[in-house]
Amino acid sequence: MATLILRRILIAIPTLFLVSLFVFALQRALPGDPFLVIAGEERDPEVIARLREIYRLDDPVIVQFFAWLGQVVQGDFGRSLRTGEPVLGLILQKLPVTIQLATASILVAIVIGIPIGILAARHKGTVVDYSASAVALSGLSIPNFWFGIMLILLVSVHLKWLPASGYESIFVHPWEAIQRLIMPAFVLGNGLAAFLMRHTRSAMLEVLRSDYVRTARAKGLDEDAVIHRHALRNALMPIITLTTLLFGELLAGAVLTEQVFTIPGFGKLIVDAVFNRDYGVVQGVVLCTAIGFILMNLIADILYVVVNPRLRTG
């Protein structure tokens, strides 16, 4: 296990370097000057020149990149060009919001998608299977922003069961945080559940055709035991991969859902930073997102070993 983790860390280092270089270069290729956007109509050329000197925007791009990279290695992500706040502080402020929403959403997706996928595979070609496929298709087809607005109108405006929007930390006010999370987590989880359902169904159908499953049935084992003890354990491999990738996408920011429910997460932060040409914030958020994807892949590799004993080495 230690060798696996060390190997993944060694692979992660050049990956993060290339991601950082790519994003840095693309940003500098965008037209426009960030300080012209910030300065507004009354632009003092001397002030703008001084700001460009302070933030080293007049240096060659490669010099700017390695200067920024040297700061990142020391734990300094720089400052926002627009507000002057430390980028790391902004990230640490928004990251718990996104993690809270992503965790709740992926739990909803797992609770809905995997059981329905197993049920559809178990009753292939029946009304249950077709109904599950229709539910999955609707989950893939309905736009999140429309579904969110409809939920707010029904649940918050008409029924007055839950708050319409906003965010609360689950560590400060747990019950209020759960109430505010239910609708956005269900909106995001509903779409992800459709992906999980389809992949779970496909993986289960493939496993149920295996020789060892036929042997287990021939021995007279109960169908529930065959499904849950033998088939599901081996079908989990692609499901784990998909779940970790979906969680990584959620960490990147569910922009539309966050906007609909007024959740101050990564999505709003990155959108505002791109429009304002706030280079430091964009670079910091993208780097943290890349680290999140790498961590999710590492967790998936560890779960493979836990689920499949054949992958364990002495």
Image: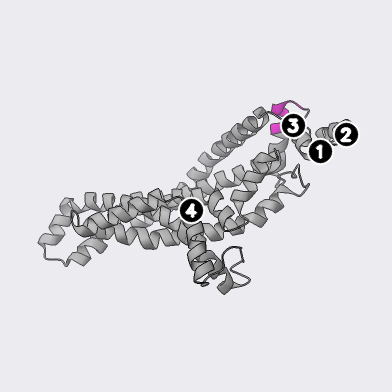
Marks 1 and 3: CB-CB under 8 Å?
Answer: no
Give the spatial CA distance, label 2 vs label 4. 44 Å
**What mark, if any, has residue 146 been given in the picture?**
4
Instruction: Determine the image quadrant of residue 33.
Output: top right
Q: Which residue is label 3 attached to?
A: 33
Marks 2 and 1: CB-CB under 8 Å?
Answer: yes
Q: Main secondary structure of the magenta part?
A: helix
What amino acid is at disc 4? Answer: Trp
Residue 68: image x %, image y %? 71, 37
**Mark before the other along the chain sequence, 1 or 3:** 3
Regarding mark 4 in the picture, which secondary structure is present there? helix
Give the spatial CA distance, label 2 vs label 1. 8 Å
**What mark, if any, has residue 44 been given in the picture?**
2
Q: Relative to 217, is 82 above or below?
A: above
Residue 9 visible in the snapshot = yes
Give the spatial CA distance, label 4 vs label 1. 36 Å
The residue that appears at 23% across and 56% down in the rendered structure is 129
Query: Where are the magenta residues, as a range?
Result: 59-65
Query: What crowding class fits label 3: few (fewer than 14 Cα within 10 Å), some (14-19), or many (20 or more)?
Result: some
What amino acid is at disc 3? Answer: Asp
**Mark before the other along the chain sequence, 2 or 1:** 1
**Mark before the other along the chain sequence, 4 or 1:** 1
The residue that appears at 45% across and 50% down in the rendered structure is 143
Regarding mark 1 in the picture, which secondary structure is present there? helix
Q: Which residue is label 1 attached to?
A: 39
**Mark before the other along the chain sequence, 2 or 4:** 2
- Does residue 62 show up magenta in the picture? yes
Give the spatial CA distance, label 3 vs label 2. 14 Å
User: Which circle, 4 or 1, is nearer the viewer?
Assistant: 4
